Image (cartoon, rainbow, N blue to C red):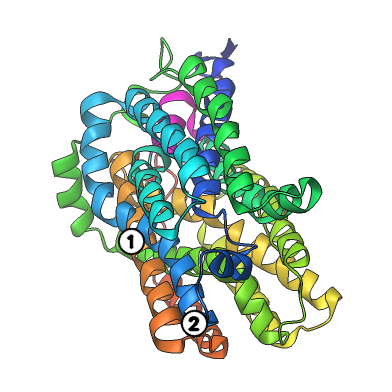
Amino acid sequence: MEKTEKKFTLYKRRWAVLLSFVCVNAVMQYGWAFFSAIVTDAWKFYGFTDAASGEAAISALTMIIMVAMITLSIPASWVFEKFGWYKTVSVAGIVLMIFTLLRGFVGGTSYTALLITTTGIAITQPFIINAFGMISALWFPPSERGVANGWGMISTYLGVVMAQFGVPWVMSTFGLDIPGALKVFGFLSIPMVLWFVVVSREKPPTPPADEELIERVSFGEGMKQLIKNKQFICALLVFWLMQGVYFTMTTLLEPILQFFNEGSLDSMFVGTLGTILTITGTITTLVLPIISDHSKSKKRKPIVLLCQAGSLIGLVLIIMGHSVGLMIVMACCMGVFLTGVTPVLMVMGYEAAYPVSEGTTESLMQLGANGWGLICLTAVNAIFRGNHMGTLAFFIGGMVLAVILTLFVKEASLKDRRLE
C-alpha cells in the first residue's frame, strides 16, 4: 500500500487490476480487428468474387460490432450501475471467450458461421470497453487517472496490433490458413480472460481520494445533465469524429493503402505499417496523459489541437506518400496524433461531464464513436465502393470539423474540474 499526500490509501493492486483489464479488452479488440491486415485474402477465402463486395463483407464484421455498441451502450450503463463493473466485465469476458473459441472452430467453415460468432463477440463489447473510466475513478487518485485511462486505451491498441501483425505473422510462420489462425487466437483468449476474473475486484477497501471525487450522480440524472452541457457535447462530437476515422482506418487499412499504391503492397508490409501505427500510438497514449496530468494548467485542449493537425498530415500522406519512408512517416503520424490523443480526449469529456458517472460518459462516447464509424464504413462501401480518394476526402472533412468543434470547447478551471 502507498499513502498519498492527504493520507488516502493507494493499493498496489490497482495496477494488477488495470493490467488484467488490459488483457480481457485486448481479446475483444483482436476479435474485431482480426482481418484488418488480410482483408483481400479473407474475402477471397470466403468466396467473394470482386473487391467491392468482398471488402463490404469483411467490413460488415466490424459494422456488427459497431451496431452492438450503438444499441447496447446505454443498457450497459444501467447494468454497470446495477451490478458493478467487475461482475459485468467478468460475465461479458467469459461469453467473449466462448464465442472467440467457437469462431475458431466454426467461423472458418463459412461466412455465415463467421457472422454468427462475430455477433456473439460483438454483444460483449459495451459491457467490457465502457468499464475503464470506472476503474480509474474507483482505484486511482485524480493525479493518475489520465495514465489509467491511457492504459485502458492501450488494451484496445494491444488487441489491434495482435491482429494487424500477429495474424499474418502466425499464418506465414506456421503455414496456417484462416481457420487455423482463428483457432490460435481463440485458445489465446482463455488465459487472458480467466486472469481478469481471478485478479480484478470492484473497488479497493478504502477510496483513493475524497469521496466527493468518486461519488457520481445517478444514470438518469446524469443523462439529463449531459443533454444541457454544451462543453461536453462539443468534446463528445470531437471524440466521435476522430474515433470514426480510427475505426475505419483499422478495418480497411490494407485496401486503402493498396488503392493509393496500385496494389503493389503485400499483407505483411501492411501489417507492419499497422503495427508501427499501433506501437507509436501506444507509446503516445502513455506519454500524452502524463504530460497533460502534470502540466501546470492540466489543459487538454492544446494537446488535442496539436494532434488534430498531425492527423491531417497523416491523412494527406496516405494519398501522396508512396515511398517506404513516407508510408512509415504516415503510420507514425496516424499513431502518434490520431491514436495517441484518445485518452486525453476521453479525460476532457469526463471532466466536462463531472459529476456524471464515467460509466455513463464512457457509454455515450463509445456509442457515438461507433455510430460515426458505422456511417464512415457505410459511406466507404456503399458510396465510394473502392474509390478511396473519396474515402480520404471524407476523412479530411471530418477532421477539419473536429478542429472547429475543439476551438469551441472552453475548459473549466482546475477547481471546477476537481483537479486541484
Q: What are the residue bounds of the magenta stretch?
A: 131-144
Q: Is 332 contained in the magenta span? A: no
Q: Is residue 14 above or below residue 67?
A: above
Q: At 63% from the left edge and 45% from the top edge, which residue is drawn? A: 180
The residue indicated by pointer 2 is: 52
Q: Pinpoint residue 150: horizontal percent, then vertical percent.
A: 57, 43
Quadrant where the N terminus sits is top right
Label 2 or label 1, whichever lies nearer to me, is 2
The residue indicated by pointer 1 is: 368
Q: Is residue 237 above or below residue 317?
A: above
Q: Is 136 contained in the magenta span? A: yes
Task: Give, as a three-letter code, the residue at label 1.
Answer: Gly
Q: At 66% from the left edge and 53% from the top edge, which residue is drawn? A: 177
User: Relative to 320, is 35 on the left or the right?
Assistant: left
Q: Pinpoint residue 307: horizontal percent, then vertical percent.
A: 61, 66
Q: Is residue 10 in sight in this rendering?
A: yes
User: Relative to 346, is 119 on the left or the right?
Assistant: left
Q: Pinpoint residue 77: horizontal percent, then vertical percent.
A: 25, 40
Q: Quadrant of residue 378?
A: bottom left
Task: Give, as a three-letter code, the residue at label 2.
Answer: Ala
Q: Secondary structure at mark 2?
A: helix
